[in-house]
Amino acid sequence: MYQVLLVDDEPLVHHHLRSLSDWRNQGFGLCGEAYEGEEALRMMDQLRPHIVILDVNMQGMNGVELNRAIRERYPSVKTIMLSSYDDYDYVRECLKNGAVDYLLKHRLDAEQLLGVLRKAVREMEKDQDGQMRNFGSPSEFRELLAQTMRGRPGAVKELEDYARESGRLQGVVCYTAAAMQISSFLLLAESRSDVQTSRMVQQAIALMQQTLGDQPERTVTYVENGRIAVLFAFKDRSEQAAASEAERLMSHLRHSLELFLNLKCTYAIGHVCSSLSKLEASYRAAEQVLDASRPLTMEGVFSERVSLTIEEQKQILLSVENLDRGGVREAIASAFEGLRQQPVHAQAVQMIVRELLSIGEKAARKWVPFAGGDQAGSAFSAREDLGRIDSVAGLEQWLYSYYEELLDRLKRERAAGPHSRHVSQAILLILEKYPSYITLELAAGAIGLHPSYLSRIFKEETGMTFSEYVNRVRIDASRKLLESGRYSVKQVSVQVGFSTYNYFFKVFKEWTGMTPQAYVQKIKPPHSVK
């Protein structure tokens, strides 16, 4: 498949070109989009397109300059110019510098576009005719290899035919395939645009191929969902030596990806085989090792829980709202039951973590002022950190930290207001300690004030005594717990920090005007009363 890069400073032109044709079915892939010349050159270093469609008249580096730069740096890349009537002098200059053809924006249709793209392909094939006879096209070989690993019917035969006709892999006596998985790919992809995700993958592929060297006996190709396949072909090597060399190289690749791209990856290597026809089986064996920890049903089908229940989601939100750190940790630990023995890249793991992140961001948007949009996530542990995590235990610990930061932020927001520093510190302590034990004396000692002084300024600034404020926080939390329908009245009294049920009963009635039981009767479902 031939890769195409679009370069134009008008977003509408990008949209029009994307929607003009079914690119993939026509043998072309859109590998990237740039909006100015310098950006295009940077992307070319990473994406290595075969064809560039570029606007003649752009801000900054115009199309003439960009076309000249492409010609000098990437002589094998074909360029197609986009033009308006009044740009023709520019177009003529570009055609002199090797552009394949030009397209008029206001007349552009699918037939014209495909015609010029195919013309570019013919010119590439003509330029590379000698090389293809002797060595074959690396990109075409890589695409056939990817299709083989994806299991497309007939791909193995096409790969064998292509290798034989092009002379690639001549003299090879044994093969093996390896599978490399970007550990938290689904989570990383969710926080990126499609272009950014594609760029991340292309950077990984380019780095791996560069590390292995540009030779057909070591070919890297992308399969799907963060999974990368690597072909190893050996001449005059025993199976044991081939397996040992493949292991050494894959370990080196994993280290390079972590060192240069900050990506944690896992890999597995398939068995050594004697022909390309058996390569897919070798790759499947590698995948089975990668996915070996996934749970099976009695019928041998993968069985995974890929989402939280509604009750689990409600419980996490309730614990966050009540600043209940223990409840949050318990809910996260419960969600990870059954996941800890799975590989970190398993869909179930990635989906559950994504859902837990989504709940946290929802809570931030709801209860933390100005935490809308991207700030809801960026205010806490950066999602980029996920790329460095290569275990389920690591993801679980990361989520604990994420929610700890969320609770700290929410607690600070609730304590904020027209209060002095000392009163704000006292409120923070109340919000932190109310489920267990907190008194005026403990708070004063923690802050470094005399209890009588703290008592006076607290009453002046909040309008309540310290004990009244503690009781208000506890009753607010108890109402939310009762409304959840998950706990009995006695259980709630303990969870919010009351030492005796009778005292809880008395304080609840003072603050709400009704008993806890009467309050429960008011809310639904009534059968939750215990």
Image (cartoon, rainbow, N blue to C red):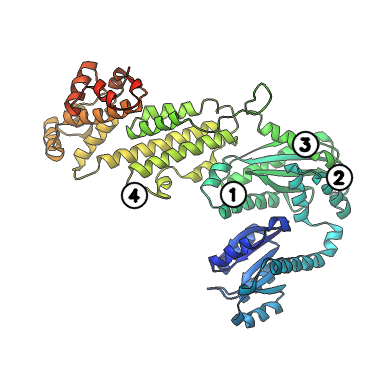
* Residue 61 position within the rendered picture, expressed as x and y whole percent measured from the top left: 56, 73
Q: Nearer the viewer, residue 488 or 126?
A: 488
Q: Which mark is residue 260?
A: 1
Q: CA distance from mark 4 to mark 3?
A: 52 Å
Does residue 440 appear in the picture of this structure? no
Q: CA distance from mark 1 to mark 2?
A: 32 Å
Q: Which mark is first along the chain, 2 or 1?
A: 2
Does residue 88 appear in the picture of this structure? yes
Left or right: 126 as drawn, with respect to 210: right
Q: CA distance from mark 3 to mark 2?
A: 16 Å
Please name the residue shown 59% across and 65% down the image: 16
Q: CA distance from mark 1 to mark 3?
A: 29 Å
Residue under label 2, please give it: 172
For the residue labelled by badge 2, is the local secondary structure a helix, a strand or a loop? Answer: loop
Q: CA distance from mark 4 to mark 2?
A: 62 Å
Q: Which mark is first along the chain, 1 or 4?
A: 1
Q: Is residue 203 above or below residue 430?
A: below
* Location of the N terminus (image quadrant): bottom right
Please name the residue shown 86% across and 38% down the image: 274
Q: Is residue 192 above or below residue 273?
A: below
Q: Amino acid at mark 3?
A: Ser
Residue under label 3, please give it: 282
Q: Amino acid at mark 2?
A: Val
Q: Which mark is residue 370?
A: 4
Q: Amino acid at mark 4?
A: Phe
Q: Which mark is first along the chain, 2 or 4?
A: 2
Q: Nearer the viewer, mark 4 or mark 2?
A: 4
Q: Nearer the viewer, mark 3 or mark 2?
A: 3
* Residue 106 position within the rendered picture, expressed as x and y whole percent measured from the top left: 61, 74
